[in-house]
Image (cartoon, rainbow, N blue to C red):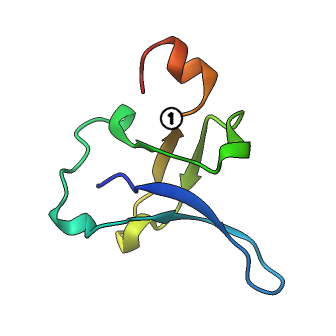
Amino acid sequence: MTPPSRIVLLKPDYLQSIVPLWLSNPFIQRKARHFLEMKCDFPPNWNQLIGVRIHDYSGDRETATILNTAHPILKAVSLV
């Protein structure tokens, strides 16, 4: 799996979804070898959210956990 560039909140009329966003083609980027490499930027006001779990990640029918690079705990243990 390839980590997204960032996590965004998609808000159509009545439904909200947290979705991954890639700023370049994810199929030609380096794939994560370990779950701790699945990290990216989240909206700035989400710095207390350590991560999200996304089902059917990138259409692979896999579940992915994406970590928030701005979270204080991850910064404290140098995982970002």
Kindly identify the residue that appears in the image at 15 percent across and 64 percent down: 28
Give the percent coordinates (x, y) of residue 16. 75, 72
Task: Please rate how many residues cluster around mark 1, counting C-alpha atoms within 10 Å: few if below 14, some from 14 to 19, many from 20.
Answer: many
Residue 9 showing in the rendered view:
yes
Q: What residue did someone put label 1 on?
A: 69
User: Total of numbered circles in the picture?
Assistant: 1
Question: Relative to residue 20, is residue 44 drawn left or right?
Answer: right
Question: Relative to residue 6, is residue 30 drawn left or right?
Answer: left
Kindly identify the residue that appears in the image at 38 percent across and 74 percent down: 59
Q: Quadrant of the N terminus?
A: bottom left
Q: In the structure shown, which secondary structural element does the residue marked by tag 1 occupy?
A: loop
Residue furthest top as drawn: 77
Residue 9 quadrant: bottom right
Residue 61 showing in the rendered view:
no
Given residues 72 and 38, the one toward you in this image is 72
Kindly identify the residue that appears in the image at 74 percent across and 83 percent down: 12
Question: Relative to residue 32, is residue 7 drawn left or right?
Answer: right
Mark 1 is on which residue type? Thr
Instruction: Reply above or below: 49 against 77.
Output: below
Kindly identify the residue that appears in the image at 26 percent across and 44 percent down: 32
